[in-house]
Image (tube, rainbow, N blue to C red):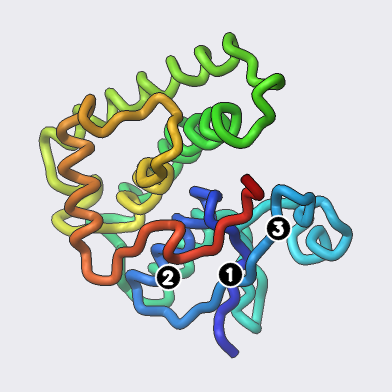
Amino acid sequence: MTNTLYCFGESGNAYKAALALELAGIPWQAAHVDFFNGETRTQEFRALNPMGEVPALDTGDEIMTQSGVIQHWVMETTGKLTGDTPRNVLRWTIFDNQKVSGVAGPLRFLMNFLPEEKRNADVIAFHAGRLKASLQILEGELTKRDWLAGDAISCADISCAGYLFYEEPFTFTRADYPAIDAWLTRITETPGWKHPYDLMARAFPG
């Protein structure tokens, strides 16, 4: 059975799982989730993932949720994208979940996918400030090394970069962060890399 990833293109968290599968050479197929029309809130989807979110990976033997868990399975299964130590990859994955994706995701949603009349400027400014602080940390680290965990791309890089390839505005401009910009370019030059919208179909109706 081919591994099935439940996902949609706008989800940076799903992208992190999809890109890890792709770069590790694991066969997989995308099962499109119609997020913006409420599919993740249906009983059918909640039976698959009670958390009501993507990504979810069905391997045929088990169903895994959360991008970090899926990335861990990719590393464990293939021995690829493992970085220098498991703890260092985990360190950056947690940093990303709390400080980068955990802020960039809601900020991008507020600025692009929520109806304009519901976009609260104060909330956007708060998230933008938090994201800037986290990106400054990432920028500082990437001035010292090419990759976050070791001497090659790992799931640490895939995690932290997940939301940074999207073109929709969310206060992140690559030119403002030269080290991050160069790092993202290195990632795109990795054999097998694809943009999120090339790996997964879009769901936003606009």
Q: In which quarter of the image is residue 191?
A: bottom left
Q: In which quarter of the image is residue 55?
A: bottom right
Real-space Cα distance between discs 3 and 1?
13 Å
Q: Name the residue under label 1.
A: 5
Q: Which residue is drawn at 60% across and 79% down?
A: 59
Q: Mark 3 points at which residue?
A: 34
Is 3 situated above or below 42? below
Q: Position of residue 140 (x, y in %)?
A: 19, 27
Q: Which residue is drawn at 22% across and 37% down?
A: 180
In-image side of 105 versus 153 (left or right):
right
**Contact, mark 1 vs mark 2 (Cβ under 8 Å):** yes
Residue 21, disc: 2
Q: Where is residue 22 in the image (x, y as percent from the top left)?
A: 39, 71
Q: Quadrant of residue 26?
A: bottom left
Which secondary structure, mark 2? helix
Say few, some or many: other residues with alpha carbon within 10 Å of mark 3 (under 14 / 14 to 19 / 20 or more). Answer: some
Is 162 situated above or below 124? below
> Does the rendering let one see residue 72?
no
